Amino acid sequence: MSTPEPDHSHEISQRDLRNRSAEIMDGLERGERYAVTRNGHHIGDLVPLRRRRRAVSRAEFAAVSCGMPRLDDREYRQDMDRHVNDDLYDPYDRAYGRREFAEDEG
């Protein structure tokens, strides 16, 4: 049982792929799809990668976040105080304790 072939805007032969690779890569960057054939038989597809967006518009963010529950600042702070130790910690304490930063005694 064969799977149906996807609809392609371009069909190219193996020879076309080799000889026109730069042109085909440019087409992929523009979002074009290619069906690659060898001896007239469909052997594969070249499809552009889906690009991820780096930012979400303010309107999209507002639309998505409107269904979020409201955050109670006081309750959030109390929860953080219960679970997070805010005491200052000097990451160099252990190194000083091992005298890694001690001056050479001459």
Image (cartoon, rainbow, N blue to C red):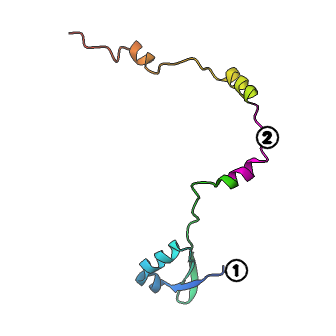
Label number found at residue 69: 2
Q: Secondary structure at mark 2?
A: loop
Indicate the quadrant where residue 85 lies: top right
Q: Nearer the viewer, residue 67 or 36?
A: 67
Give residue 40's position: percent from left, percent from top: 56, 90
Screen quadrant of the N terminus:
bottom right
Residue in the image at 57% along x and 55% along y: 54
Badge 1 amino acid: Pro
* Outermost top residue: 106
Q: Position of residue 100 (x, y in %)?
A: 35, 18
Residue toward you, 37 or 82: 82
Vertical order, 37 against 105 (above or below) = below
1 to the left or right of 56:
right
SS type, badge 1: loop
Q: Nearer the viewer, residue 74 or 28?
A: 74
Label 2: few (<14), some or many (≥20) within 10 Å? few
